[in-house]
Image: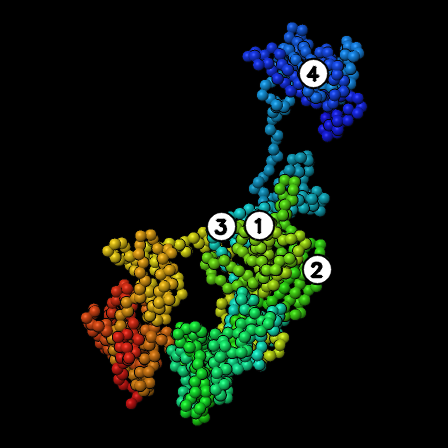
Amino acid sequence: MTRLGNEERLEDRARDLGGKGLNAFRLAYVTLDAAPKPAFAWLDVEFWNANALAPLPPREAFKIQGATRQRSGNPARAVAVVQVLPGTGNTLRLQIAPVGDYSTYLLSTTRVGLSAPDNALPLAMDPLLNALPFKFRPGCFNLDCTPSEKGRPAPTEPEIDYLARDYDSFRHVLIAAMMRRVPGWSPTSEADLDQVLIDLVAADADEQADYHDRVMNERALATARKRVSLARHARLLDYHIHQGNQASTWLALEVAGMVDLPATSKDEFGVWSGRAWQDDDAVIFAIARDGGPWRRRCFAPLNRLRLYTWGKTVTALAAGSTEADLTAATPLTQAEAEALRDFFLGTHASQVPGPGAADVSTAVDQLLIQEALNPETGTANGVRIAQRQLLQLLPLQGPIARAEALQDPFTGEWLVRVRWRAEDALRQNFCFICDCAGQPVEDVSLFHANLLRVTQGRPRITTFRAPGQPLGGADERSFVARDSVSYEIVLRQAGSASLLRGVLCPLPASPLAYRASPPGGETPTRTTAQVMVQGFAEPWQEQSDLIESQGDDQHFIVETDELGGSSLRFGDGSNGAALPTGAFVQCRYRVGQGSQGNVGADSLVGFVDASGAVQRVWNPFDVTDGRDPEPAAEIVRRVPEAYRQHQLRAVTLDDYARRAEELPGVAHARARYAWTGSWRCVQVAIDPAGGIVLAEPLRRALADHLDAVRLIGEDLEVRAARYVPLDIKLTLCAQPAYWPEDLRAALEEEFSDGWTHDGRHGFFHPDRWTFGQPLYASQLIGRALSVTGVGRVLRASMRRWNPGSGGGLTEIDIDPLALPESRLEKIPVGPFEIIVVANDPDHLETGRIRFEITGGRR
């Protein structure tokens, strides 16, 4: 009889035998004789206790049964106990002869033919544990050396149609299976119970198959549809998908007195388009809570600044100006002028941060110039939004003073002269005094210095609490929305144990605003989320992933799905610190981003200010930097080739040129090899953006940037481009209704190296010309004919300023009754040369262009 029982209870029974005066077999160890053909074996038998082991039982008290070929019952070859010796502890040493085969034998006790005291051990043995199997097979350390189960034929697999993946195919399979298994069954009415069950099972299988297909699709970049999956696949190739970003703009303000915006670090200063921020179509902006001082201090004297006209003798500022003389609405005294100067220098007494104002910025580094009145009518109607420009003032520690107080010796009035960067030179003329209907109109244009940067999105604070903890109330009526939700603890199974995988905090409002970042996949995206965890003094830092985060790093990541919903994910204690048990998480973030924030100028006029000192706000420029998330199709197309976008070494000459053009301030670059006499040198010629002078700081930055990617064994030299000045003369015929001098002024503006009055590049603006770009006569003729008032071009002549350097005078005579010839005459230039025509009479070596005008009004 084969018994199957509870092993734990059987072991408990064996341990309790000692108290009952009983005993039982526990283990047996087989040791063969050391001879080549062993004649006997030693069997060390361990009992559960020492009951009835003394005196030694006779060998007749033990019985051996079993064997398949050599049975112990055969007298000629019987396997039996021939000697009993005492062992250590609860053991007896039995000598068995002869050695049996490799089958299983059974050791037991018997009292047949024995009397007291020889039958003491058989009488004390527990009948349930009075048998111990063993084997003579050497090298086997258990009782089951050969498989006990025999092979079985493979079970018949059910017929499964793996092509069934939708409702109709599943329903067909189920109906066919029913017809095979139930003789005589056939589908009848759709209302029958069996038919209803088949439909329900088919519908559920269809849904499960859809889930399975979607999960399988997410495993590869080409088939993934979930935005989170696309982001994770892209990170494997070191590509950061662009999640869109919030729009941002400059805001101009007029205030009463001195005010900090917002009043405290817990408040928010926001503006919006439309009548109220609660409107569905309102676009909300607020001050960004970036690192460092983020609050802004505004001053009433900087609301509106006028141009000092020196007794109405200066009526405008010309394009290219980099300084202006400022005054207030009333003439300034010396003390007032010095106070205004101190505002620009950052030394005014009110600019010193007070207690609790370490996060307040008081510097005045920008200046806004904008047209306030229409110069043609003298009214606010028809004001040109294009007549506005942001000016970045000179550095405080620079060689030229940013601001200084001056006195007009003629009138005795004081003024403040401010200067701004050459890069921000006025792109067009700005009028300040105009004559309308015979009356002078002043303050056509004004300066404003109370400026601050705002970004898109409504502020929101969400508190996440552990599951089961009470939640706080929600407030959607305030400008700063507040709510409270529970976070989700994500576990993973490791065998029978449940281990922490992380904590997931789904944000209840969407879309989460992302900070501005360039597209292309090289720059990690960052959100506006600022996370504080209970028990930690510093905010936790956002990362792109937690792969490289240590177990104590206070990091979190943000994942945004295709519907715009975002979730915060915290670590598990191995990759990123785990949240303390029961701790709450407070997240301050912005809601709203993308192209919907690209509003027009003067749209942000509504504002919320707890102090009440703000009188007026407006955005002087169109908002254009709001971006929508990168489409999924673009991600799938770009990610596999993303590694080619940014080469981390320069091998060819084009590599050097492309890497140089990555730096701001470089319009174009060209590289060539040169021999220094010892080794090869790479000469990189630079065409600066917006000019022809390669500044020393830019040259050093280029040298450091290229030195990091150059090949070993190659020297590097950064130099300015070789500029080729030209001498050009155009002979034109003016239309009868136009004065030649007026036409000459328009032509000089059109062919200048600066900006036109309507904000276009002049023909010879440095950014329009690059290395090796020739000048064609047809370009001159076409641009001249585009000027209103030019009838035709009679002659175009052009040459290099130094004829000996290449090429003499090239002239083209044009028949007034015929079109220009199709053959294009040009001034060729070398691969490292750039054309320049500054038309500066004081520096003719930078090129000139002359106009000879015939006809017109006389």
What is the secondary structure assignment of the residue under circle 2? Answer: loop
Res. 848 visible in picture? no
- Of badges 1 and 3, nearer the viewer stands 1
Splitting the image into 4 quarters, where does residue 814 fall?
A: bottom left
Mark 1 or 2, closer to the camera: 1
Residue drawn at point x = 62 percent, y = 42 percent: 494
* Nearer-N-terminus badge (1/3): 3
Q: Is residue 537 above or below residue 220?
A: below
State the CA–CA distance, disc 4 to disc 2: 75 Å
User: Pointer 1 and pointer 4: residues touching (CB < 8 Å)?
Assistant: no
Residue linked to disc 1:
551
- Is residue 147 visible in this depiction of the protein? yes
For marks 4 and 2 on the same chain, the one whose residue lies earlier in the sequence: 4
Residue 686 in percent (x, y) is at 33, 65
Judging depth in this view, the residue of 843 and 801 nearest the camera is 843
Can you identify the residue that label 4 sits on?
Answer: 86
Mark 1 and mark 4 lie on one chain; the one further toward the N terminus is 4
The three-letter code of the residue at mark 1 reads Gly
The mark lying in front, picked from 4 and 2, is 4
**Is 526 on the left-hand or right-hand side of 814?**
right
Crowding around mark 2 (Cα neighbors within 10 Å: few <14, some 14 to 19, many 20+) is: some
Q: Residue at x 67, y 59 (%)?
A: 485
In primary-sequence order, the first of circles 3 and 2 is 3
Q: In the picture, which quadrant includes the N terminus?
A: top right
